[in-house]
């Protein structure tokens, strides 16, 4: 059923257009499915045409390789978007090709990061993409490496110390997007509860360590506990909390309705959505710093897309009330669509980092595009 557009939210956006929006001929509303589909296809096409990655002879494959987390988020977004695209076969062919280039293998960076061994959460992000492709095509090559890596980790339990220096456990909030949904997806595919039990233990350990009950937000890691912004408030990174919220949504997407642990993740999504909605800029976006927008006044597209995806999923799944969150989504979607230029390039994406940084209109990255496509898929589902 089509929803009535929130007139107040639209008026606010029209009176204060998004910073740096350049030449976009239309700003699709949640109701305008055709315009949203056309825009998301343009975004996907731009990123596929402008996709680059480091090869085996280059350094820092952890961030730049074909199976790196930075690229894996785009693959995830495109895989979720493809069934809704006007060109689904082209999207899936591109994804099959990139998977083949990666040999359907989970990244391994033992030489650069020997202390991480098999455990680093970022390297499991691409596994979630492989499992999504396995769910569609059923080819064992798409499953084998992911299962092997997860089984090795579970068979040789990681160091559970929660210091940010320990990357064997999920000691930074980004990890809650990178790894837990992969375990949950493997549990669904295999029928084994061992994967989801392992995931739940690790997730709750991270939650207990990093979630600030007073603010209802996640610290990036424990090195930020004592740090403060220029205005004296705690440092809560916009994209970091976007990662966490999207990670919760990713777990819920595949967690059975009957799973006893589901209530924990639904309640956590409700907490995050409520607190993040209260920090949304009046123009629809979220800032790199959630509690000090004056120091970081620019919009930040990757945080905004991840939060939009998580909230839209919550509405579609019946976890979040539509009456409360549809106005939030109307504003964030209006801004996100205006942050895409005529060519399909998404701007205002903060580069790789761990805390709030300055952002400009020309900045983009595959993970920001992937998050936007994930959000777009959920936005279209609101009208189904």
Image: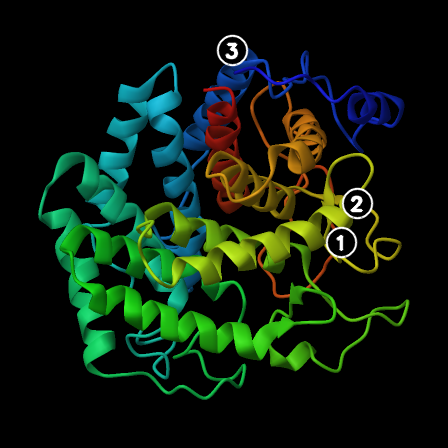
Residue 338 location (% of width, % of height) = 69, 25
Mark seen at residue 358 = 1
Say what secondary structure mark 3 lies in: helix
The quadrant in which residue 365 appears is: top right
Q: Earlier in the sequence, mark 1 or mark 2?
A: 2
Residue 319 location (% of width, % of height) = 51, 44
- Judge from the rendering whether residue 64 lies leftward or rightward of residue 196; answer left or right: right
Which dot, 1 or 2, sits closer to the camera?
2
Is residue 304 in sight in this rendering?
Answer: yes
Pointer 3 local density, CA inside 10 Å: few below 14, some 14–19, many at least 20: few
The residue that mark 3 highlights is 34
Q: Nearer the viewer, residue 35 or 317?
A: 317
Say what secondary structure mark 2 lies in: loop
For this orientation, the residue located farthest to the left is 140
- Judge from the rendering whether residue 42 lies leftward or rightward of residue 189; answer left or right: right
Residue 380 location (% of width, % of height) = 49, 23
* 108 is higher (above) or lower (below) than 13: below
* Dot 3 and dot 1 residues touching (CB under 8 Å): no
Number of marks in the rendered image = 3
The residue that mark 2 highlights is 298
What is the C-alpha distance between the residues marked 3 and 1? 34 Å
The quadrant in which residue 191 appears is: bottom left
Say what secondary structure mark 1 lies in: loop
* Dot 3 and dot 2 residues touching (CB under 8 Å): no
* 334 is higher (above) or lower (below) than 188: above
Q: Quadrant of the C terminus?
A: top left
What is the C-alpha distance between the residues marked 3 and 2? 29 Å
* Dot 1 and dot 2 residues touching (CB under 8 Å): yes
State the residue at coordinates (16%, 48%).
Answer: 142
Mark seen at residue 292 = none
């Amino acid at each position: 059923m089509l929803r009535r557009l929130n007139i107040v939210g639209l008026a606010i956006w029209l009176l204060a257009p998004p910073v740096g929006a350049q030449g976009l001929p239309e700003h699709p509303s949640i109701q305008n499915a055709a315009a949203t589909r056309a825009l998301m296809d343009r975004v996907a096409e731009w990123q596929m045409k402008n996709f680059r990655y480091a090869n085996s002879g280059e350094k820092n494959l952890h961030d730049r390789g074909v199976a790196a987390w930075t690229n894996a988020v785009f693959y995830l977004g495109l895989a979720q978007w493809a069934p809704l695209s006007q060109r689904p076969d082209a999207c899936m062919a591109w994804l099959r090709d990139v998977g083949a280039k990666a040999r359907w293998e989970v990244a391994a960076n033992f030489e650069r990061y020997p202390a991480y061994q098999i455990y680093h959460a970022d390297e499991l992000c691409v596994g979630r993409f492989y499992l999504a492709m396995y769910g569609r095509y059923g080819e064992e090559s798409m499953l084998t490496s992911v299962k092997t890596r997860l089984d090795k980790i579970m068979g040789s339990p990681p160091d559970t110390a929660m210091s940010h220096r320990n990357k064997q456990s999920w000691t930074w909030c980004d990890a809650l997007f990178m790894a837990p949904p992969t375990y949950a997806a493997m549990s669904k595919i295999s029928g084994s509860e061992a994967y989801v039990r392992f995931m739940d233990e690790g997730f709750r350990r991270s939650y207990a360590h990093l979630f600030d009950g007073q603010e209802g937000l996640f610290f990036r890691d424990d090195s930020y506990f004592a740090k403060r912004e220029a205005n004296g408030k705690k440092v809560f990174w916009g994209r970091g909390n976007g990662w966490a919220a999207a990670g919760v949504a990713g777990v819920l997407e595949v967690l059975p309705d009957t799973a006893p642990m589901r209530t924990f993740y639904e309640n956590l999504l409700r907490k995050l959505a409520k607190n993040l909605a209260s920090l949304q800029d009046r123009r629809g976006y979220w800032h790199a710093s959630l509690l000090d927008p004056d120091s970081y006044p620019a919009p930040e597209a990757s945080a905004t897309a991840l939060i939009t995806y998580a909230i839209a999923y919550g509405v579609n799944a019946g976890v979040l009330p539509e009456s409360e969150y549809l106005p939030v989504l109307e504003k964030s979607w209006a801004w996100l669509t205006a942050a895409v230029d005529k060519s399909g390039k998404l701007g205002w994406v903060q580069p790789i980092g761990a805390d709030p940084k300055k952002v400009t209109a020309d900045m983009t990255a595959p993970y920001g595009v992937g998050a936007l496509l994930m959000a777009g898929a959920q936005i279209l589902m609101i009208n189904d």
